Amino acid sequence: MPISQLIDRMKSHPRYHDMGMIASHLGVVRRTSLIKGGEVSGIEIEFDQAAIERIIEYAKQNKGIIEVLVETHPGKLSVGDEIMAVVVGGDTRDHVFPTLISVVDRIKKEASRKKELGL
């Protein structure tokens, strides 16, 4: 799902009128490995959807957060392909930005496994 559709879903939320901010993250496959250096042809990635749901539910408990949406693209991906989109809606940037960063970091650490290809 394109990130614009996730933002549209956020805008149709029943509490959209309480939101003062929507922030998003769109992760894409980059050409250069941060782990080994050199160029990659892509990645293979798996996501633990149950863990992602727990992360979302935890994030929704943060002060000022109204909604958290996550879309993942598992499997074999090429350079430039979208990996994951995260959209967070809440009252202020002081609440939304830290929640967005936390959700992305936790999914990367706790709910995904990635293998770089072509090294």
Image (cartoon, helix red, strand yellow):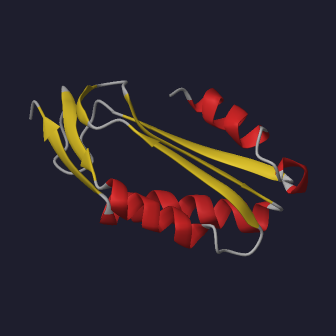
Q: Is residue 95 left or right of residue 77?
A: right
Q: Residue 40 at what x, y percent from top left?
A: 19, 31
- Is residue 90 in view? yes
Question: Residue 76 lies in what quarter of the image?
Answer: top left
The residue at the point 78 percent across, 39 percent down is: 11
Q: Residue 12 at what x, y percent from top left?
A: 77, 38
Q: Is residue 102 left or right of residue 42?
A: right
Residue found at the very far right of the displayed protein: 17
Q: Is residue 46 left or right of residue 85?
A: left
In the image, residue 115 sits, relative to residue 60, either above or below, namely above
- Is residue 40 in view? no
Q: Quadrant of the C terminus?
A: top left
Q: 68 and 81: which one is in front?
A: 68
Q: Residue 108 at what x, y percent from top left?
A: 35, 57
The residue at the point 44 percent across, 67 percent down is: 54
The residue at the point 76 percent across, 46 percent down is: 13
Q: 32 and 11: which one is in front?
A: 11
**Count of all numbered marks drawn on residues in the image:** 0
Residue found at the very far front of the displayed protein: 14
The residue at the point 20 percent across, 43 percent down is: 37
Q: 107 and 6: which one is in front?
A: 6
In the image, residue 39 sits, relative to residue 67, either above or below, namely above
Q: Residue 67 at what x, y percent from top left?
A: 68, 56
Q: Is residue 59 left or right of residue 45?
A: right
